[in-house]
Image: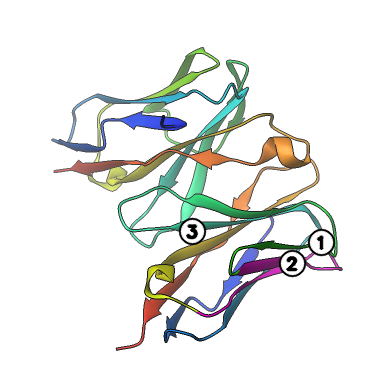
Amino acid sequence: GQQLNQSPQSMFIQEGEDVSMNCTSSSIFNTWLWYKQDPGEGPVLLIALYKAGELTSNGRLTAQFGITRKDSFLNISASIPSDVGIYFCAGRPAGNKLTFGGGTRVLVKP
Amino acid sequence: DTAVSQTPKYLVTQMGNDKSIKCEQNLGHDTMYWYKQDSKKFLKIMFSYNNKELIINETVPNRFSPKSPDKAHLNLHINSLELGDSAVYFCASSQAIWGGKQETQYFGPGTRLLVL
């Protein structure tokens, strides 16, 4: 099946910083979705992307559907403490099911 | 009002027991899913139903049996529970199984299953 690699696996943020994470796939995807999961909760949809090159923002979050259709990135600008959580990318190749990346754990710098 | 709801939120049970988890969505969606999230937080699809019809059935032990009485409900019954079944189980729904925005999935709050 298709592979979906999400990086980094974890990151520390300091309030005010901009951070970025990305996902790459071994095949061409038609859809990229970004979710955030808070402890004890289900994943919540942040941004959905449906066209190559599409750049979409949701508040301080910006995500892009890579032009090759094999990658996507998510940027968080001006981090705040409540940005802590696990961020998942999910992608779907044509005619196949949605696949999730392994998640990026965002933690606060001690 | 909660869009995708699951019951129970927590389930602690003994090995060998049979248990069910229920899911309901009030979004008017046609497609529903069950996912398993392991201790490393990896999300893996188990089943998908579209209009009460089984569409996706991943390599899941046949001790797991989904049932969709109607489009708004998808339940998961697990027979002869094993220690390795301990995980968080998420229900999700989407308007349709394919088709751009229609396939965007919305998740429930999860059921935390612990098998002792």
Which residue is denoted by mark 1 in the rendering? A54
Mark 3 falls within which chain? A
Q: Does the magenta stretch include residue A18?
A: no
Disc 1 on helix, strand or loop?
loop
Which residue is the extreme one toward the top?
B69
Which residue is denoted by mark 3 in the rendering? A36
- As drawn, B52 above or below A34: above
Q: Is residue A69 magenta?
A: yes
Work out whether disc 3 and disc 1 sit on a shared chain. Answer: yes
Which dot marks residue A64?
A: 2
| Mark with earlier residue (2, 3) | 3
Mark 2 falls within which chain? A
Q: Which portion, as a residue range, is magenta?
A: A61-78
Under mark 3, the amino acid is Lys
Report, in whole angstroms, how far the alpha carbon at label 3 lies from the one at label 1.
Answer: 20 Å
| Mark with earlier residue (3, 1) | 3
Q: Where is residue A91 in the image (x, y as percent from the top left)?
A: 68, 54
Under mark 1, the amino acid is Glu
Task: State yes or no: discs 1 and 2 in contact (Cβ < 8 Å).
Answer: yes
Residue A32 visible from this viewpoint: yes
Q: Position of residue A55 (x, y in %)?
A: 77, 65
CA neighbours of label 1 inside 10 A, class few (<14), some (14 to 19), many (20+): some
